[in-house]
Image (tube, rainbow, N blue to C red):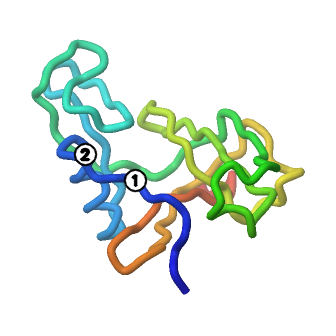
Amino acid sequence: MTYVKPLPELTHEDRPFWEAAREHRFILPRCRDCGHIWFPPYSSCQKCLSFDREWIEASGRGTVWGYTIMCQPYVPGYADEMPYNVVLVELEEGPLLYSNLVGVPDEEIRPDIPVEAFFDDVTDDFTLIRFRPRNRTGE
């Protein structure tokens, strides 16, 4: 089966992030000058504008901050999956990240669900980071 949904186009700014995801590692950029952690992985820090960044291992844990349920096939590749969810996850490290939440019926999605990342190998060359519910006692 061919993956028909759009995939990100790698740039020099985000290539390390996507290469790490392919290795099933979740990394984020951190400013070496002020310590700020951000996403998406631009070349410079959003807080102090420094270009001196490093990559750190992320916990993969976060909380649903917001969500929407897509009911229109705006992107043809998603037509067979209607409706589908898009969640905004606040990572423990601070940044917000858009993804999908699996393992929860769309009608039960709400803010404050604790989640954890997992790696979805959608092609031989590309891995997406998605989220699933995290047991509150296992935090």
Q: Which residue corresponds to the image point at 24% horizontal and 25% vertical from the top-left?
A: 35
Give the x, y percent position of residue 103: 73, 65
Q: With 98 as the anchor, is 133 left or right in this view?
A: right
Q: Residue furthest bottom?
A: 1
For the residue pair 67 and 137, the one nearer the viewer reads as: 67
Image height of 11 relative to 120, above or below: above
Query: What amino acid does circle 2 point to?
Result: Ile
Indicate the position of residue 59 as horizontal and vertical percent values. Answer: 41, 50
Q: Residue at x 65, y 34 (%)?
A: 65
Provide the residue designation for mark 1. Answer: 8
Q: Residue at x 27, y 46 (%)?
A: 14
Numbered tag placed on residue 56 in the rendering: 2
| Residue 134 visible, this angle | no
Q: CA distance from mark 1 to mark 2?
A: 21 Å
Q: Is residue 32 above or below residue 122?
A: above
1 or 2: tag closer to the N-terminus = 1
Q: Position of residue 63 (x, y in %)?
A: 62, 41
Please say if 33 is above or below 29.
above
* Visible residue check, residue 61: yes
Which amino acid type corresponds to the residue marked 1 in the rendered image? Pro
